[in-house]
Image (cartoon, rainbow, N blue to C red):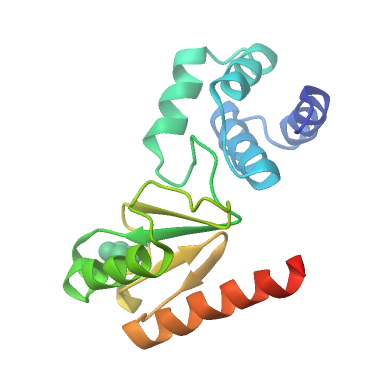
Amino acid sequence: MMSEEKIKKEYERIESLSKNPQSTLLAMLHFIQKEKGFITEQDAEYLSSISKIPYSKVKAVMTFYTMYNLKKTGIHHIQICRNLSCHMAGAPALKKIIENELSIKEGEVTPDGLFSLTEVECLGSCGTAPVIMINETYHENMNEEKLKALLKELKEKNENTTR
Ligand code: FES
């Protein structure tokens, strides 16, 4: 669990570089998510207290952007785009594959905590639709074959590291 001290230290570092409170807030939300995978109400309250940005504003920003996870995610957090280009290029079928292969529904985490799946708004790479993001990595021009191979690879990687 990340300490408040660590958050504060990073806040002071970013704030000294950027005098724009909005950019500092976005950078801080990104930092917290990168460190522990998701952002809690408690984090929002703490950020508000050190930045003097009203809690309601912090909360509004973190809920507005779908890239911020508000609940615990799997080690491999899969985001699948649900907007038009990806939808037309076959995203719904890819989503079904993920749900079937991992036996979870959108919004859920696998019981072993390895995978989670969420649908998000445009990932900003419509020209290479359909697009999936796993943690910080884009997987573009996805198709059923590539997706199945990727899931298999991730499952195997975890089997090898947990042995
Ligand atoms: S519509 Fe999917 S990345 Fe833009």
Q: Is residue 26 left or right of residue 12?
A: left
Identified at 52% across, 50% down, the residue is 111
> Is 56 located above or below residue 5 in the figure?
above
Q: Along the line of sight, which residue is nearer the eye, 79 or 149? A: 149
Ligand 1 found in image quarter: bottom left
Q: Residue 99 lies in what quarter of the image?
A: bottom left
Q: Position of residue 110 (x, y in %)?
A: 49, 53
Q: Residue 75 lies in what quarter of the image?
A: bottom right
Query: Is residue 123 visible in the rendered structure shown here?
Result: no
Q: Is residue 118 left or right of residue 87?
A: right
Looking at this rendering, what residue extends furthest in the bottom direction? 145
Q: Quadrant of the C terminus?
A: bottom right
Count of marks, rendered view: 0
Q: Position of residue 85 (x, y in %)?
A: 22, 69
Q: Is residue 32 left or right of residue 162?
A: left
Identified at 46% across, 19% down, the residue is 57
Identified at 41% across, 77% down, the residue is 140
Q: Along the line of sight, which residue is nearer the eye, 99 or 95? A: 99
Q: Quadrant of the N terminus?
A: top right
Q: Along the line of sight, which residue is nearer the eye, 154 or 13? A: 154
Identified at 57% across, 39% down, the residue is 38
